[in-house]
Image (cartoon, rainbow, N blue to C red):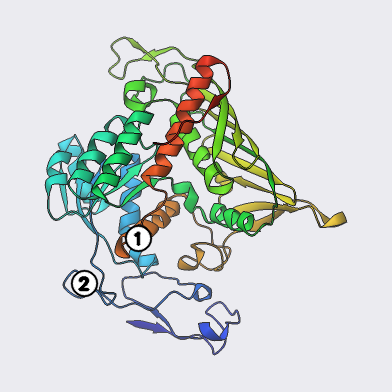
């Protein structure tokens, strides 16, 4: 192991250490180039030749179903998590699965998987797999997850959990019956600034919450000649930006404020037909292009939500603001290292302040870079995988669970029901 010794009482960046942090900083040859001692990560040793390390925990053997956008970012998380969070035993990236043999073989080589397959059924049947990661379109989530649960595998599924509430309920019933660990991939909970916002709320810094307002805006399908890809087909995607984008901000509202009890929504499809991907004719768009709704929360707060793919100039614009009796919080994903905080007790000096969430005391940050050195989108997935693997290694229940996914699905469907009825609708029970 390499050893780097700082001056007594100071860290490598010249900051004074607390007594309990005055220790030698140890880095393995293959580990991270920086380690923030303010976060005091434990020292670690290289793995021995078997699957057991000094912690006595076995490496989690992972199979990933899906190799496109989410498959790529999940692969990155598995590949890097233990280099930055050394308390997590490095997972074994056993096999990646997809329908196109040539493309999945290329993905396995590029992303670092040991093997590749075109049959998720064969992958689930293997006895050398502990965790099934489902990163496919929504129409296949339920079938794969239920089969994985019946095979006794832990299941990690991308959001939204399913295309319909009945499917989501079946998935929840399957993992609960099999008593297998389960988690749904709401990665934005793991943005350090958002985790820190939750901490401030739980500490009472905002007091009673009055408002939650959120927007998730994109613009990638504004061209009427953009083809009819799977995300624009209800039988594959379930819904448009409602399920894709509103699912995220619904989950964040639950994470930060509480449960939604009642909604009033509207949806709109601006472009009714689009060219087929093969260029042979046109097909009907069967999902929403925009979805907006109002909400009432269990604790008395009110909320507004907007998701669209027709906001010109907005590429991945997730924002929220929370207003309470003592102050407010505001966040913008395109500036994800920052959190705005307003304290209304400050008199003539009051106003929103920018908090740069890059200190070792902030959630997850101690594993990364010195203060002021920002992180990005991919790090949220590394944090997500870190928490999942820790839960599996400690035999604890990961969060958010499939039950959280079902609750989110119940809100999504209540909004669609409300839009159809043009009235307020109560959110149905998850079970």
The earlier-in-sequence mark between 1 and 2 is 2
Q: What residue is at 52 percent from the left and 39 percent from the top? A: 249
Q: What residue is at 82 percent from the left and 57 percent from the top? A: 346
Nearest to the observer: residue 28 or residue 143: 143
Q: Position of residue 52 (x, y in %)?
A: 21, 72
Q: Quadrant of the N terminus?
A: bottom left
Reading the image, the residue beneath label 2 is 52
Left/right of residue 320 with respect to residue 101 in the rendered view? right
Depicted 3 relative to depicted 338: above or below: below
Nearest to the observer: residue 260 or residue 276: 260
Q: Position of residue 155 (x, y in %)?
A: 28, 47
| Residue at mark 1 to residue at mark 2: CA–CA distance | 19 Å
Q: Nearer the viewer, mark 1 or mark 2?
A: 1
- Residue 396 numbered tag: 1
Q: What residue is at 55 percent from the left and 34 percent from the top? A: 261
Instruction: Classify 10 Å Cα crowding around label 2: few (below 14), some (14-19), many (20 and above).
Output: few
Question: Extreme top residue here?
Answer: 281
Left/right of residue 332 with respect to residue 78 in the rendered view? right
Q: Secondary structure at mark 2?
A: loop
Depicted 412 relative to depicted 90: above or below: above
Instruction: Classify 10 Å Cα crowding around label 1: few (below 14), some (14-19), many (20 and above).
Output: few
Question: Extreme bottom residue here?
Answer: 8
Q: Position of residue 410 (x, y in %)?
A: 45, 32
User: Residue 146 sits in which quadrant?
Assistant: top left
């Amino acid at each position: 192991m390499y050893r780097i010794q700082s001056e007594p009482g100071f860290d490598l960046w010249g900051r004074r250490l607390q007594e309990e942090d005055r220790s030698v900083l140890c880095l393995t040859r293959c580990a991270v180039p920086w380690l923030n001692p303010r976060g005091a990560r434990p020292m670690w040793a290289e793995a021995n030749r078997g699957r057991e390390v000094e912690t006595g925990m076995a490496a989690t053997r992972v199979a990933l179903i899906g190799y496109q956008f989410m498959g790529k970012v999940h692969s990155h998380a598995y590949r890097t998590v233990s280099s930055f969070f050394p308390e997590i035993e490095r997972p074994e990236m056993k096999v990646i699965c997809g329908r196109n043999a040539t493309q999945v073989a290329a993905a396995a080589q590029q992303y670092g998987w040991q093997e590749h397959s075109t049959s998720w059924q064969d992958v689930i049947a293997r006895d050398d797999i502990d965790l099934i990661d489902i990163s496919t379109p929504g129409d296949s989530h339920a079938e794969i997850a239920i089969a994985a649960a019946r095979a006794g595998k832990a299941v990690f599924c991308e959001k939204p959990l399913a295309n319909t509430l009945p499917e989501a309920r079946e998935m929840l019933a399957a993992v609960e019956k099999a008593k297998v660990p389960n988690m749904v991939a709401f990665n934005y909970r793991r943005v350090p600034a958002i985790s820190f916002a939750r901490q401030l709320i739980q500490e009472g810094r905002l007091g009673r919450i009055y408002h939650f307002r959120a927007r998730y805006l994109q613009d990638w399908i504004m061209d009427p000649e953009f083809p009819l890809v799977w995300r624009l087909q209800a039988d594959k995607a379930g819904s448009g930006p409602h399920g894709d984008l509103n699912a995220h901000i619904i989950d964040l509202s639950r994470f930060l404020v509480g449960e939604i009890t009642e909604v009033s929504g509207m949806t709109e499809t601006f472009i009714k037909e689009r060219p087929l991907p093969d260029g042979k004719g046109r097909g009907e768009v069967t999902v929403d292009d925009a979805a907006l709704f109002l909400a009432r929360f269990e604790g008395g707060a009110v909320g507004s939500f907007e998701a669209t793919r027709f906001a010109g100039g907005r590429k991945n614009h997730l924002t929220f603001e929370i207003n309470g009796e003592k102050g407010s919080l505001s966040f913008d994903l395109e500036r994800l290292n920052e959190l705005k905080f307003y304290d209304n007790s400050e008199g003539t000096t009051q106003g929103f302040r920018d908090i740069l969430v890059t200190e070792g005391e902030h959630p997850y940050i101690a594993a990364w870079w010195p203060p002021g050195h920002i992180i990005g989108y991919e790090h949220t997935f590394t944090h997500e995988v870190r928490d999942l693997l820790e839960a599996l290694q400690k035999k604890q229940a990961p969060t958010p669970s499939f039950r959280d996914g079902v609750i989110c699905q119940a809100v999504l469907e209540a909004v669609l029901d409300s839009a159809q009825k043009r009235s307020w609708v109560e959110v149905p029970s998850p079970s």
